[in-house]
Amino acid sequence: MDRPIRVLVAKPGLDGHDRGAKVVARALRDAGMEVIYTGLRQTPEQIVAAAIQEDVDVVAMSILSGAHNHLFPKVVNLLRGEGADDILVIGGGVIPDDDIPGLKDAGIEAIFTPGTATSDIIYFINNNLKR
């Protein structure tokens, strides 16, 4: 690779808590990745526009509000619609185990729940890039 892995960390929906997303962003940065953090309350359209504009390799979304079954797949579908299905999409937050298979079927490559070591997220990204 001739450039660092570029990761967009995004908080979709009305969720107002971003401590976990900032911890993950810092860990990814410390691991040598370039991180773009979109801030709170982003729409799927805003996330996709930023991902394309920033030419990212990974979109990492964090959600605690319970809207993951709607918002995560919407981001994947919008990326596909823009021809950006080469972007690795991962998610995290308070997500019930029963919802994870459906999210993976919708194109979310991995779901990281509370308590996941940041090293596991870094390992997954390094070993599952689509570029």
Image (cartoon, rainbow, N blue to C red):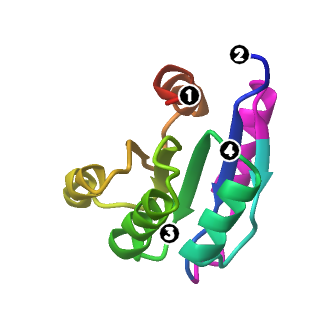
Label 1 packing within 10 angstroms: few (<14), some (14-19), many (20+): few
Disc 1 vs disc 2: Cβ atoms closer than 8 Å?
A: yes
Residue bounds of the magenta highlight: 14-34
Q: Which residue is mark 2?
A: 1
N-terminal of the two: label 1 or label 4? Answer: 4
Q: Secondary structure at mark 3?
A: loop
Label 4 packing within 10 angstroms: few (<14), some (14-19), many (20+): many
The reply, left or right, for residue 85 in relation to residue 24 is left
Q: Which residue is mark 4?
A: 56
User: Residue 126 at what x, y percent from top left?
Assistant: 57, 22
Give the amino acid at mark 3: Leu
Is there any visible trace of residue 118 in the rendered image?
yes
Q: Secondary structure at mark 4?
A: loop
Q: Residue at x 52, y 28 (%)?
A: 129
Give the amino acid at mark 2: Met
Q: Which residue is mark 3?
A: 64
From mark 2 to mark 4, how far is it between C-alphas? 14 Å
- Residue 41 vs 27, above or below: the answer is below
Q: Secondary structure at mark 1?
A: loop
Question: Comparing marks 2 and 3, which lies closer to the viewer?
Answer: 2
- Residue 104 vs 14, above or below: the answer is above
Q: Residue at x 52, y 61 (%)?
A: 82
From mark 1 to mark 3, how far is it between C-alphas? 29 Å
Q: Indicate whether residue 25 is drawn in magenta.
A: yes
Residue 85 versus residue 22: which sits nearer the camera? 85
Question: Comparing marks 1 and 3, which lies closer to the viewer?
Answer: 1
Q: Quadrant of the C terminus?
A: top right
From mark 1 to mark 2, how far is it between C-alphas? 9 Å
Residue 28 versus residue 78: which sits nearer the camera? 78
From mark 3 to mark 4, how far is it between C-alphas? 23 Å
